[in-house]
Amino acid sequence: MSATENNPVVERTDILVIGSGIAGLFFAHKASSHSDITVITKKEIFDSNSVKAQGGIAIAVDDEDSAELHLKDTVSAGRGLCDRGAVEVMVREARQRLDELISIGVEFDRDSSGGTLKATREGGHSAPRVLHFGDVTGREIMEKLLESVRNNRSIRIHEYHLALDLIVDSSGSVIGVFALDRN
């Protein structure tokens, strides 16, 4: 059944994720153990800026580093523009998120023995804490997240669906979205 202006298709879902970058797919992956998820993306699911990200991700992994030092570096580099509460959550939970990515198969560069994660020191950081997978870190994370999401029966993916407008109830709560199926 195809939708028309006068005959729209209504799909119900517990949670709707708009966008298929790392943030959207990781959220869908995590939330799927509690709810049914629908992901809509305006192009193909793998067509996102996340795939193109060459830089690594910053996480205090070395014994001489800490979440507190990472927080200090991030707030300092942010020059007053960081939401300190958000940064605190990010650095405090970073190691757990890294472990979750590794558990779904995401690879990162390791030392010559293949055991220890290889962290580099980059701008704004006082310690080596940036993890890479060559120069295709974003692609590596996206490939593994996409595999996990596509194999999850609690997640539906709709490619070529352009979100046009949010549907808001009288209390101001978002209860849906008008999306154009461009297939």
Image: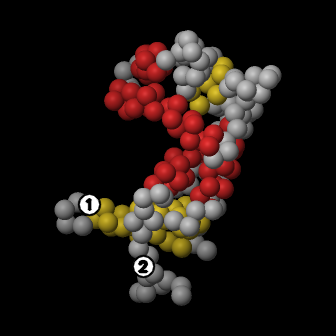
Query: In the image, residue 80 lies at what x, y percent?
Result: 36, 21
Is disc 2 surrounded by few (<14), some (14 to 19) or many (20+) residues within 10 Å? few
- Residue projecting furthest to the left: 171
Q: Nearer the viewer, residue 76 or 70?
A: 70
Is disc 1 surrounded by few (<14), some (14 to 19) or many (20+) residues within 10 Å? few
Query: In the image, residue 92 lies at what x, y percent?
Result: 43, 28
Does residue 163 show up?
A: no
Say what secondary structure mark 2 lies in.
Answer: loop
Residue 123: name its quadrant. Answer: top right
Q: Amino acid under label 1?
A: Ser
Does residue 129 lie above or below 133 as drawn? above
Does residue 86 lie above or below 31 as drawn? above
Does residue 59 show up?
A: yes
Query: Mark 1 and mark 2: span between their CA atoms?
Result: 18 Å
List the residue tagged with mark 2: 10
Query: In the image, residue 167 lies at what x, y percent?
Result: 33, 67
Say what secondary structure mark 1 lies in.
Answer: loop
Position of 136 with respect to 93 (left or right) is right
Image point 75% across, 32% down: which residue?
A: 134
Image quadrant containing the N terminus: bottom right
Q: Amino acid under label 2?
A: Val
Image point 36% across, 67% down: which residue?
A: 176
List the residue tagged with mark 1: 173
